[in-house]
Each structure stands twice: as C-alpha cells, then as structure tokens.
Amino acid sequence: DYGAIAGYGVMRTPALVVDETLVLSGRVPTAAQVHDILAPLVA
C-alpha cells in the first residue's frame, strides 16, 4: 500500500519501520547494522 508506506516518510526502499517509527530507508543494512538498530528495542 503506497499510501501507508509514504505515510511513514519513506522516499526510497527498502525501508524498516519499528513501532510506527521509520528507522531505516534507502539502503540494505548489514546484519550488524540491523542488530544495532534492533538491540535497544528488545532490551
């Protein structure tokens, strides 16, 4: 749904939204970068 995607402010894909917050957009992260993004959210 393009409207929902744009609602998060995504201008380029891929994108990652966590808890209604855009945390990554426009690039493919490494595994370490994904870990760094998600680790504080599950602690």
Image (cartoon, rainbow, N blue to C red):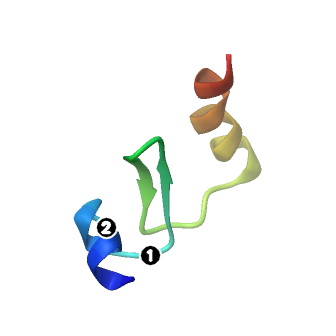
Q: Is residue 12 above or below residue 22?
A: below
Between 6 and 32, the residue placed more toward the observer is 6
Tag 1 secondary structure: loop
Is residue 9 left or right of 37 when viewed as pictured? left
Above or below: residue 41 compared with residue 3: above
Q: Secondary structure at mark 2?
A: loop
| Marks 2 and 1, how far apart at CA | 7 Å
Q: Quadrant of the C terminus?
A: top right
21 vs 38: above or below: below
- Disc number at residue 13? 1
Marks 2 & 1, CB-CB < 8 Å contact: yes
Q: Amino acid at mark 1?
A: Thr
Residue 10: x and y, percent?
31, 67
Q: Which residue is mark 2?
A: 10
Query: From the viewer's perspective, is 6 left or right of 31?
Result: left
Where's the N terminus, which quadrant?
A: bottom left
Residue 8 percent coordinates (x, y): 29, 60
